[in-house]
Image: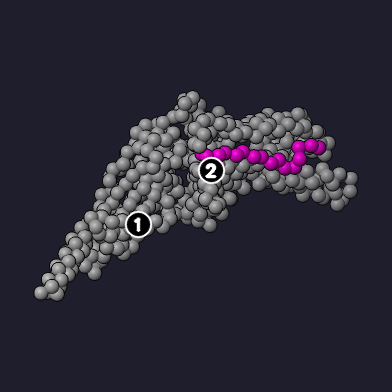
Amino acid sequence: MTTCIRGLALLTLAHLACFASAASAASGPIVRARIQPEDVVVGEEQRLVVDVLVPTWLLGAPRLPELEIAGVIVIASGEAGVNLTESIDGATWSGVSNEYALYAQRSGTFRTPQARVGVRYARDGAPVDVELSLPPARFDARWPPGHAGGPLLAASSVELTQTVEPAPDGLRVGDALRRTVVLRAEKTRSMLLPELEVARVDGLTPYRDTPKLVDRPGRRGAPPLAERVESTSWILERPATYELPAIEVVWWNVVEARMETAAVPSISFSVAANPALAAGAVKSSAESHAGWLIAVVAIALVVAFRRVDPRSVRRRTVAALERARHSEQARFGAFVRATREGDARKILGALFAWLDRRSPADETATIADFVVESSSPELGGQTDGLEASLFSRGEGPAWSPGELRRETVAARRRARRAEDRRSSDPLGPLNP
């Protein structure tokens, strides 16, 4: 009798266990969302954590949506999520946790948009696909005390360094001085590092390289490191004493909760006259391939007459090559080569470098102005598609490097023809 009762009890427990398992399997997946931390200063990193749990097991990574939040830069982690195991109502659920990085660009209260999360999991031994709503999440960002608004770098540490080549002594007209400034910051992204100002100094012509942006993972548990490298070559046009001003970056220390300043000192140097190089010829030759001709003539003089100081020839050659390298033609050639390589980031950088070279010195080049000038909707669609492919989380216009190259070449040709017409008829029509 005792044996029968014991067997009946075990059978009942087995039925209950099967019922509990079936009940868990019948339950749908769970999606949770939370912000960590909820309140930060503008530019400080926040995390949107999305957990997906199923009563059995996942059959693939969850299909997470691309999120757009006005006033916030949203970056999906792009890494495999962290596996989860939880006990819910006595049953074991499994899943994965993923993250988005959020960087508010202004103060205010923000909310995540409506979005759907795709989940594929096993139920009764068969695959099941479902879509679930992403729960809404709310977060805040504020300006730190003493900051009135505008761009703000928030990081755990910031370092600013510079190098100068060659050493700023013994310089002469026609030489080139190169200043490279490196901005490094922890616990942020390189795309958030501010652009460093290049001052206008009378007597010096700056040629700015496309900034290099690098993101590196932290070593041995350290925060990730963001880096921005900016290099400017200065052509020395006439003898004088000069000073390249100090560069400062004001930033918010997220660890110490205070404003700080990183800086590199100014650079003072003197430029001596160069008897073998007329100062006035330096700038005029920078606009064309005449720089190459100067270099060839200088070398020919050395060979034919052996009366030219080799150092002046070297300076002249370096200066001519530097000017030619930064000419409008050279920068447009760099853009064409970038479109053939097909790297969107390089294409955009080369396009900006060329537009900056063809714009007046006191104006900032923009793609929008160039599109308006070209009167080409096709060019506008290509540039919109290029920028969307790099910066937008949503679907952008279709574009291709080859089509962008063709439209830009055509727009440049039309612009040059218009300039030729204006130069041939400077007075314009008598009766406009």
Residue at which label 1 appears: 84
- Residue 374 position within the rendered picture, expressed as x and y whole percent measured from the top left: 46, 41
Residue at which label 2 appears: 186
User: Where are the magenta residues, as a range?
Assistant: 153-170
Q: How many marks?
A: 2
Q: Is residue 159 left or right of residue 155?
A: right
Task: Characterize the magenta stretch by its predominant secondary structure.
Answer: strand
Mark closer to the chain start, 2 or 1: 1
Tell me the residue at 42%/35% (across/down). Answer: 40
Q: Is residue 391 left or right of residue 323?
A: left
Q: Is disc 2 surrounded by few (<14), some (14 to 19) or many (20+) residues within 10 Å?
A: many
- Residue 241 position within the rendered picture, expressed as x and y whole percent measured from the top left: 75, 29
Q: Is residue 284 visible?
A: no
Q: Nearer the viewer, residue 289 or 11?
A: 11
Q: Is residue 118 magenta?
A: no
- Residue 211 position within the rendered picture, expressed as x and y whole percent measured from the top left: 57, 44
Vertical position of residue 236 compared to residue 306: above or below: above
Tell me the residue at 31%/62% (across/down). Answer: 58
Q: Amino acid at mark 2?
A: Glu
Residue 229 is tagged as none
Which type of secondary structure does the marked residue at label 2 adopt?
Answer: strand
Tell me the residue at 41%/57% (across/down). Answer: 80
Q: Which corner quadrant of the image does residue 416 belong to?
A: top right
Q: Which corner quadrant of the image does residue 161 belong to?
A: top right
Q: Amino acid at mark 1?
A: Leu
Q: Which corner quadrant of the image does residue 5 belong to?
A: bottom left
